[in-house]
Amino acid sequence: MSIRHGLLALLERGPRYGSQLRTEFESRTGSTWPLNVGQVYTTLSRLERDGLVVQDGEDDQGHALYSISDDGRTELRAWFETPVDRSSPPRDELAIKLAMAVGAPGVDIRAVIQSQRHHTVKAMQDYTRLKAQALTDVPANRDEVAWLLVLEQLIFQAEAEARWLDHCESRLVRLAEAAATEPEASTPSRAAARTTSRPRARR
Amino acid sequence: MSPHVPSPAAPPLPVDAPVLELRDLTRTHGTGIAEVHALRGINLAVHPGELVAVMGPSGSGKSTLLTLAGGLDTATGGQIIIEGQDISTLGRKGLAALRRRSVGYVFQDYNLIPALTAAENIALPRELDGVSVRKARKEARASLEEMNLLDVADRFPDEMSGGQQQRVAIARALVGDRRLVLADEPTGALDSETGEAVLALLRNRCDQGAAGVMVTHEPRYAAWADRVVFLRDGSIVDQTLSAGADSLLVAGSAE
Ligand SMILES: Nc1ncnc2c1ncn2[C@@H]1O[C@H](COP(=O)(O)OP(=O)(O)OP(=O)(O)O)[C@@H](O)[C@H]1O
Ligand SMILES: [Mg+2]
């Protein structure tokens, strides 16, 4: 997740100090990804080193203010205009777990799937309840609208996971049925398939 | 980075007597080698104010469960209790009256009457139940308005799109003061915005005290329910709890 660009986007609206950036970042995203002040200052000093922000005096209370530079604005535009990279997907613990559960001794993979499905659907119920609350009044300001979008992203992502789990289960059931009807053919042909038609590994 | 979201207010635990109760419910089709156990001993109670979603693979018994709960099919074993009455003791007439008065049913394939307009389809069960024609028509229009469908009020089913027919069927199930709403895939023909609006209406009806059971394949719609029941091969294999007890967010905030 890009804290760097998030901070640049907030600074484009005018000079701000560290803990103010943290507060604004969190209210925009409903505290979904909490930041600590230390992270904010570390990021700010890297941005300063790279010439994307500059220190810009102090406010009345003596907070050090930062503002975005022209290079920072260019960087921010480029960020908005460039799609988020999908070529090296983040490691997904669930995908790794299911991959490891296939054929693992003493592991009931359907039970693994169901326990995850329970957890995922439960999370969706919680998110949906928050969303219904957020929608009781029409979202008024940009923080409320932004929070709703983040919440719906969590819902859609969880939904994708739940659907994939459904798919895994029916895939496994079908493969098991196929294996049961052709017991002999399965062993050698599967080994052959593994060496010939394996999808290209990424790394 | 894992998301961290505040806990929503947990819904209150049900205290009233259940509107619907299924006890050791079984349904078997055919005999001998052709025997199919569509339901194998289902126990489920749905309380006023509660919306339950039923999920499960195709053929797991979801529609069977719902048709039995609506008194539209006869159980092989077990009991179905609606508003405290074991429906097997009611007789045909009594059951028909209970169905009309207390149960709103949304069929997987809508089941609108082709010779009646949208408004007439909605008004019919109310008129059969002794509500005056004028009042029933007025209610029908109000419920069509709630569905954002007033412009199809005078059209016949074959003059409506699938999604419009589906919403008319939902309006018909929600009209009047039905205490139990049963819906089989009520969002099948709807786009995501309309589907969500329908769920909000169903949710709202339950928040006002009705009990609802909805079959769905869509996790995003199931998530509107208080409780999600997972069916597999005719049995309930798992369910999420209504209250915040096993809430991810409560657990997550303690990290
Ligand atoms: N009239 C019938 N005669 C024989 N078997 C039946 C009959 N009706 C249903 N079944 C069987 O009972 C089982 C449960 O069917 P049901 O319609 O309840 O499934 P479902 O979960 O609603 O599936 P779907 O998601 O496809 O709608 C299936 O195996 C089905 O083939
Ligand atoms: Mg069905």
Image: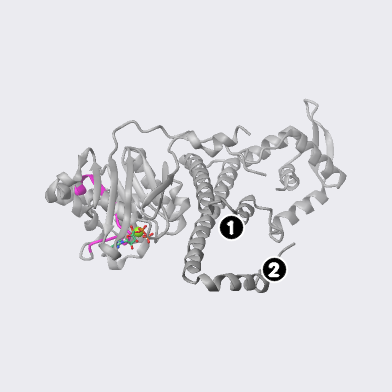
Mark yes or no: residue B141 visible: no
Could you tell whether A149 is left or right of B223 in the image?
right
Question: Residue A77 placed where, x, y %?
Answer: 74, 54
- Is residue B219 positioned above or below A173 on the image? above
Question: In the rendered image of this protein, does residue A160 appear above or below residue A15?
Answer: below
**Given this view, does label 1 or label 2 mark the residue nearer the observer?**
1
Label 1, ligand 1: CB separation under 8 Å: no
Tell whether B54 sits left or right of A105. left
Q: Earlier in the sequence, mark 1 or mark 2?
A: 1
Callout 1 amino acid = Gly
* Image: magenta residue range: B99-113
Rendered-image quadrant of the C terminus of chain B: top right
x and y percentages locating residue B19 in the rendered image: 28, 39
Q: Residue A43 at what x, y percent from top left?
A: 79, 41
Name the residue rendered at 67%, 37% in the picture: A34
Is B138 drawn above or below residue B11 in the view shown? below
Q: Say which quarter of the image contains residue A197.
A: bottom right
Name the side, left or right, on which A170 lies relative to B42: right
Same subunit, labels 1 and 2: the answer reads yes
Chain containing the residue with disc 2: A
Identify residue for label 1.
A103
The residue that appears at 51% across and 36% down in the rendered structure is B8
Where is A203 relative to B203, above or below?
Answer: below
B159 relative position to B197: left or right: left
Residue depicted at 19% across the width and 45% down the height: B87
- In the rendered structure, which amino acid carries the disc numbered 2? Arg
**In the rendering, which numbered label is found on residue A200?**
2
Is any atom of residue A48 visible in this view? Answer: yes
Q: CA distance from mark 1 to mark 2?
A: 22 Å
Q: Secondary structure at mark 1?
A: loop
Residue A160 locus on image (x, y percent): 55, 55
